[in-house]
């Protein structure tokens, strides 16, 4: 029997259930074998993501993570067993993934990705998966990938909400079009808690986007921002547009031939945040409480509009009205306002200082 180029009889047997799919075939399997994917973060998202990519036969999978396995990871990081506690994640993951599929080359990088090493780590890969749990790594990864012309399949989590998007040069906006600067304060899973099955869902959906991209099939999430709410199983999609003022991909972005250690975080669009004095000039506004609290606990004088339901809430309100978003400290509301602007809602602002300032307003 003649074997298709590069695939052994054992590989054909291993991948038989997907090779028979018309959109896949032998050519698709060969494309997977030729592909190189870097997974940044081998935690709750990275566990199912790496498992599905390795099981499907992606030729080379790189893993970046500086952390060790801890007992409190095991509730969601399904690559690891109890005996892996205190082992570096990348090496425990590599052993587990090699046992799953010895045909795949697994490369471990036991280090934290940051602006100083991002270009080195990303170079040589075709697709980057953002499964990080911190903004320093995320922004360094996004900047380096964009400049190297590499697509990023991004997912992130907060308690029982997840977000998924693809940022691909030449196809749509970059991550900084949506979130130009990192928030000053951010909570991660360790602080906020996370519903264990949610990273499983999002990481699996990330693997879906990576495989589609390698195979050139289906419709990419590029240019679309998907929000998943695990408790209600509501999936909300927002169209994303590139921002001409974006510091990374916009008209005046500082793109240079060499890679600066760090892209300077540029100031937020001046008109996105308002303080009490600005509010007086704005006239009549509708306040929306974007915090994740029950309606009964919403701020008096503000309409409850939790972040995850914000678009649905706005869809019921007149578009010509002016909206001011309020949260605890003004961080989540700033990001929400930024996102709504990107989604085409023009008259929306964030209240600087959050609920404390809101309570002090004379209305
Ligand atoms: Zn951009």
Image (spheres, helix red, strand yellow):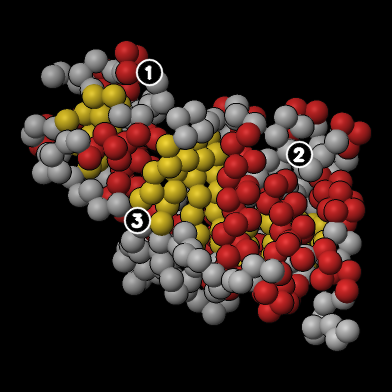
- On the image, numbered disc 2 is attached to which residue? 78
Q: Residue at x 35, y 47 (%)?
A: 339
For the residues labelled 3 and 2, the Cα–Cα distance comes to: 32 Å
Q: Quadrant of the N terminus?
A: bottom right
For marks 3 and 1 on the same chain, the one whose residue lies earlier in the sequence: 3
Is residue 115 placed above or below 294 in the rendered structure?
below
Disc 3: residue Cβ within 8 A of ligand 1's nearest atom: no
Local crowd size for mark 1, using a 10 Å CA cut-off: few (<14), some (14–19), many (≥20): few
For marks 2 and 1 on the same chain, the one whose residue lies earlier in the sequence: 2
For the residues labelled 3 and 1, the Cα–Cα distance comes to: 27 Å
> Is 179 on the left or on the right of 344, as rendered?
right
- Image quarter of residue 198: top right
- On the image, numbered disc 3 is attached to which residue? 239
- On the image, numbered disc 1 is attached to which residue? 294
Is residue 134 placed above or below 285 in the rendered structure?
below
User: Can residue 266 be seen here?
Assistant: no
């Amino acid at each position: 029997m003649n074997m298709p180029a590069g695939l052994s009889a054992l590989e054909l047997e291993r991948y038989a259930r997907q090779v028979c799919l018309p959109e896949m075939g032998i050519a698709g399997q060969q494309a997977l074998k030729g592909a190189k994917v870097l997974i940044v973060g081998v935690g709750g998202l990275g566990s199912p993501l790496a498992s599905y990519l390795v099981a499907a036969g992606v030729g080379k999978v790189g893993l970046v993570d500086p952390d060790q396995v801890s007992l409190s990871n095991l509730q969601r990081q399904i690559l690891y067993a109890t005996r892996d506690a205190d082992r570096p994640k990348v090496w425990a993951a590599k052993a587990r993934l090699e046992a799953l599929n010895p045909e795949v080359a697994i490369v471990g990088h036991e280090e934290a990705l940051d602006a100083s090493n991002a270009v080195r780590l990303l170079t040589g890969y075709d697709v980057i998966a953002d499964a990080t749990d911190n903004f320093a790594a995320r922004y360094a990864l996004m900047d380096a990938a964009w400049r190297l012309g590499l697509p990023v399949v991004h997912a992130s989590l907060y308690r029982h909400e997840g977000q998924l998007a693809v940022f691909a040069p030449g196809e749509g906006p970059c991550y900084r079009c949506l979130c130009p600067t990192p928030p000053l304060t951010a909570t991660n899973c360790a602080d906020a808690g996370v519903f264990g099955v949610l990273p499983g869902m999002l990481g699996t959906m990330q693997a879906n986007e990576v495989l589609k991209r390698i195979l050139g099939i289906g419709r990419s999430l590029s240019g679309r921002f998907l929000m998943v709410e695990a408790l209600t199983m509501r999936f909300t999609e927002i169209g994303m547009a590139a921002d001409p003022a974006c510091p990374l991909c916009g008209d005046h972005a500082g793109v240079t031939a060499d890679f600066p250690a760090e892209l300077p975080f540029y100031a937020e669009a001046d008109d996105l945040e308002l303080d009490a004095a600005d509010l007086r000039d704005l006239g009549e506004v509708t306040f929306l409480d974007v915090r994740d609290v029950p309606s009964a606990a919403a701020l008096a004088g503000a309409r409850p509009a939790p972040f995850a339901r914000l678009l649905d809430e706005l869809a019921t309100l007149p578009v010509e009205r002016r909206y001011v978003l309020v949260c605890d400290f003004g961080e989540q509301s700033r990001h929400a306002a930024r996102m709504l602007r990107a989604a085409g809602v023009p008259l929306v602002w964030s209240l600087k200082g959050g609920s404390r300032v809101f309570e002090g307003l004379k209305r």
